[in-house]
């Protein structure tokens, strides 16, 4: 795997600084679009699918959320065994109310999560996601961010990534493996 390095400590497991932590090692806490507090530990016990993005995104985020909605439909009743979330990288604009309106355009099982800038930074660090604000004309801006969909097993271990540029026909089999 290009660009990903691994190292082994003398007494520990093989670690890879480029891969997300397991859910049990993460320490983020965010607020969902229903204004409920959500922690990574809340997701242990069910497979999880997470995507980072923002509601003002013109293409990658709505495309990915549409793809996720299609994958959930293809999974049928198995999709009900998943935690599914969009974590906003734009806490200045993406309040819980804005996220509620946005995720309502997709599958109702998708949760929108936001938080303070430091809470978003902690989540991004735990998932090994990068993002940054990119100024545009006037006071406008957009957000650059990691665009993969992260999959986790029910025990919280990282399972796989569905890359934005990956052939979409491989997504559902990856999700099914994370459900096992």
Image (cartoon, helix red, strand yellow):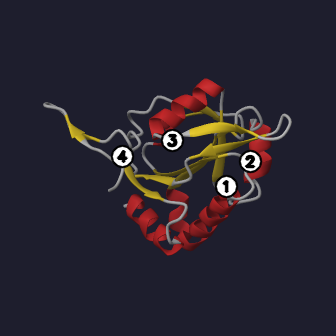
Q: Do the residues labelled 4 and 2 touch (CB within 8 Å)?
A: no
Residue 59 % position (x, y): 71, 59
Give neighbour class at mark 2: few <14, some 14-19, many 20+ (Cα, 10 Å).
many
In front: mark 4 or mark 3?
Answer: 3
The residue at 42%/46% (across/down) is: 45
Left or right: residue 12 versus residue 17 is left
Residue 97, image quadrant: top right
Give whichever of 92, 71 is nearer the camera: 92
Give whichever of 7, 79 is nearer the camera: 7
- Per the image, label 3 sits on a secondary structure element best described as loop
Is residue 96 visible in this depiction of the protein? yes
Quarter of the figure with the N terminus: bottom left
Give the Cα distance between marks 4 and 1: 25 Å
Left or right: residue 161 versus residue 108 is left
Is 144 drawn above or below residue 138 in the view shown?
below
Give the Cα distance between marks 4 and 3: 17 Å
* Mark 4 vs 3, N-terminal side: 3
Give neighbour class at mark 4: few <14, some 14-19, many 20+ (Cα, 10 Å).
some
Residue 158 % position (x, y): 38, 48
- Per the image, label 2 sits on a secondary structure element best described as loop
Q: Are marks 1 and 2 in contact (CB under 8 Å)?
A: yes
| Residue under label 3 | 129
Give neighbour class at mark 1: few <14, some 14-19, many 20+ (Cα, 10 Å).
some
* Mark 1 vs 3, N-terminal side: 1
| Residue under label 4 | 157
| Residue under label 2 | 55
Residue found farthest to the front:
137
């Amino acid at each position: 795997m290009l660009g990903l390095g691994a190292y082994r400590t003398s007494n520990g497991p093989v670690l890879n600084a480029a891969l997300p932590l397991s859910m049990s090692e993460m320490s983020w806490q965010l607020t969902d679009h229903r204004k409920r507090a959500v922690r990574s530990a809340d997701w242990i016990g069910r497979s999880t699918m997470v995507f980072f993005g923002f509601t003002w995104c013109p293409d990658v985020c709505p495309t990915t959320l549409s793809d996720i909605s299609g994958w959930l439909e293809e999974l049928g009743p198995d999709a009900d065994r998943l935690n599914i979330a969009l974590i906003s990288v734009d806490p200045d604009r993406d309040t819980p109310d804005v996220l509620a309106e946005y995720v309502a355009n997709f599958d109702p099982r998708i949760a929108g999560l936001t938080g303070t800038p430091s809470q978003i930074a902690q989540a991004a660090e735990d998932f090994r996601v990068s993002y940054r604000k990119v100024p545009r004309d006037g006071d406008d801006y957009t957000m650059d961010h990691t665009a993969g969909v992260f999959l986790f097993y029910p025990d919280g271990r990282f399972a796989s990534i569905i890359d934005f540029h990956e052939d979409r026909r491989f997504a559902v089999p990856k999700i099914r493996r994370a459900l096992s």
